[in-house]
Image: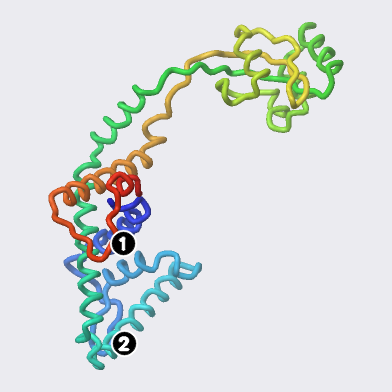
Amino acid sequence: MILSKTRFCAAVSFAAFMFSAPIMAEDKIVATVNGEKITESDVRFATDDLAGAIPASSEDMKRKYVIDYLIDMKLVSRAAIAEKMADTDDFKHRMDYAKDRALMEQMLMRDAKKAVTPEAMQAFYESQVKSVKPEPEVRARHILVVTEDEAKKALARVKGGEDFAKVATELSTDPGSGKEGGDLGYFTKQRMVPEFAEAAFATDVGQVSTIVKSQFGYHLIKVEDKREKQPPAFDQLKMRIEEFLTQKAQQDAVVKLRQAAKIERMGEAKVDAAVEAKKP
């Protein structure tokens, strides 16, 4: 079973803490504890590690909180060393686990960095855009009223030459578009109730529909434009593409290693391969 999305996210977060803030050649000392240095790089690492645990306050107070944490950590850890806790099998086991985890996450980050290039992201975006079927959109305004008689009176005003947007502002009960002259922007058929959508897409640009009844009341619809729906721009999807390609690169790396490895599970009931493959 490959690593789940949740575990990958945790891996990326931990690895960011471990490896994203390189130690500078001149690492400024911010405090000492019994002669041992606490540096700016320590503060950066701890700030990433603590993340949301740092109380909301000014930047100076947050920094003080982190440095106090590092001072306490030095004091307690050195006390633990003095009591030879570092020599226990339990501690050594924990350190082996932490080392394996850190190495795993560093390697996964490296593989992701190699795979998730600007060129790869652009190519993925273009492949997805090509697979999207063109879909028609309409831009329209509407007037929504409670009764058919009100709709007839509104239609008479529009046919008499009054501006549709002005009439919509005065009469429409739609809380979303009424104050905007009935403007609904662009929409596809799926976004609207069937009766409204059918009328809107059947009406020519610049024309006003007949009275349309829906579950919301009575509508008049003025179609202002028709076009093919445009896919979202690359910049709108960039973060989601990067996340997807990162997870894919990491999953591919783990799958490749699993396929080349000899793995034995001790004391477990045999699991059907097809069932195992469905697990996240």
Q: Residue placed at 66% from the left, 7% from the top?
A: 207
- Three-letter residue code for mark 1: Phe
Q: Which mark, residue 69? A: none
Residue drawn at point x = 34 percent, y = 38 percent: 241
| CA–CA distance in space, label 1 to label 2 | 24 Å
Left or right: residue 83 versus residue 222 is: left
Q: Quadrant of residue 46?
A: bottom left
Where's residue 92, x and y in %?
21, 79
Colour setting: rainbow
Residue at the far front: name it: 269
Circle 2 packing at 10 Å, graded few (<14), some (14-19), many (20+), is few
Can you give x and y, in whole percent of width and height, for residue 96 in the image? 20, 72
- Residue 66 rendering spot, x and y as whole percentages: 38, 74
Badge 2 element: helix
Q: Write down the residue under mark 2.
A: 75
Along the line of sight, which residue is nearer the eye, 46 or 249? 249
Q: Nearer the viewer, residue 18 or 271?
A: 271
- Compared with residue 59, is residue 135 higher up or lower down, i.e. above or below? above
Question: In the rendered image of this protein, does residue 89 appear above or below residue 117?
Answer: below
Neighbours of disc 1 within 10 Å: few (<14), some (14-19), many (20+): some
Quarter location, residue 133: top left
Furthest residue in direction right, as rendered: 149
What's the residue type where badge 2 is placed?
A: Leu
Asked if labels 2 and 1 touch by Cβ distance under 8 angstroms, the answer is: no
Mark 1 residue element: helix
Which x, y percent locates residue 73? Answer: 33, 81
- Image point (22%, 86%), residue name: 88
Q: Is residue 129 above or below residue 106?
A: above
Q: Is residue 80 left or right of residue 257?
A: right
Query: Which residue is denoted by mark 1 in the rendering?
Result: 14
Up/down of 139 relative to 33, above or below: above
Task: Give the number of marks.
Answer: 2
